[in-house]
Amino acid sequence: MRFLDEAVITAISGDGGRGCVSFRSERFIPRGGPDGGDGGNGGNVIIEASKRLHTLYDFSSKRCFKSRNGSPGKGKNQKGKDGSDTIIKVPLGTIVYDQETGDMIADLIRDKEEILILPGGKGGKGNAHFATSTNRSPRFAQPGLSGQKRLLRFSLKHIADIGLIGLPNAGKSTILSRLTLAHPRIDSYPFTTVDPNLAVIEFEDQTSLTLVDIPGLIEGASEGRGLGHRFLKHVERARFLLYVIDIAQAPADNPLSDFHVLQDELVKYSPSLAGKDQMVLINKTDLVPIGHANIQKMKLELSRIGLESLPISALTGDGLDDLKQVLSNKLSKNRHHERYNDSNEKRTA
């Protein structure tokens, strides 16, 4: 299934049914008066977030969603049937925009979270509503109100705890496959990953973390080189960033050159993204001994700028248990911080 994180659709709510013009006519009641029922309301258009979806691919083939119209009213004061609602399901993390104005309507981040995007037209009143002392036999009723139409744009930003960032072939997909049950495409040529991959790390204490692996960045991605940098939006919600550096390709005179390239591209995309809590994984130690001068130099320079680092080999698995422990500690720390903030908010309220 092809990955899609942007889509434009047309949403149309249902028209209200017309009111009925009818008069009661029964045996022994020759002039029973008006009994026209109201029309049914048109169906609403509702957008619902679903954790079962991970892409906007469904909207590549269907771009128009229309709710049913309300049914007309009937005699004997029978109200017409309301039109059924249309529920449009989108992945968690979908931002809904008005395509014509550019205004953000909603940011759906919780499972089964709903937003009424377009109400259906109200059904018209039947002639029974219009009887008065001076007009006991009204021969008119209201038409139903028309539904509404809106052009919407969906933009998906994955919800993940951790974002994996690196140059092509740095080993991000291999790390993802070793830490989780995911099976991303892995090969020796650049840009093997062309779409974001989302996966879950399960810990022994039954807790879990979500990782997102995005396509590799290269210098000039902000100017459209390689696959560009638009995929960075999928790590905007991440609480923690893992930079993956290929130590086997790092030049001896400047082992942090790749890291600085990645940092520069993040700053160009969003300075706040580059300021997130982060850590550097020094990958491919199976090709370079742990005691190699380049590794020690990289660790020293990273510590000088206040960044934690960890040598690993995604291929052999060396260091991955330590990495899982670090991530588990980060999860515990974040959850403790969230509980502390929640309790403070409750006391303030």
Image (spheres, helix red, strand yellow):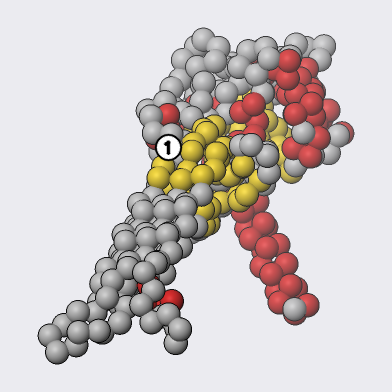
Quarter of the view holding residue 163: top right
Q: According to the image, label 1 marks what residue?
A: 64
At numbered mark 1, what does the secondary structure look like: helix, strand or loop?
Answer: strand
Q: Quadrant of the C terminus?
A: bottom right
Whether residue 178 is situated above or below residue 41 in the rendered picture: above
In front of the other: 269 or 249: 269
User: Identity of the amino acid at label 1?
Assistant: Cys
Q: Is residue 87 above or below residue 153?
A: below
In this view, the residue in front, 106 or 163, is: 106
User: Based on the displayed image, in which of its 4 quarters is residue 84 positioned?
Assistant: bottom left
Q: Quadrant of the N terminus?
A: top left
Residue depicted at 42% across the width and 29% down the height = 60
In the depicted structure, whether residue 134 falls above or below residue 191: below
Q: Position of residue 135 (x, y in %)?
A: 42, 80
Side of 151 relative to 232 (left or right): left
Q: Residue at x 16, y 82 (%)?
A: 26
Residue 166 shows in this picture? yes
Relative horizontal placement of residue 103, taking residue 205 as reference (left or right): right
Query: x, y percentage for residue 195?
Result: 51, 26
Give 145 or 283, whichever is nearer the viewer. 145
User: Residue 139 placed where, x, y %?
Assistant: 36, 69
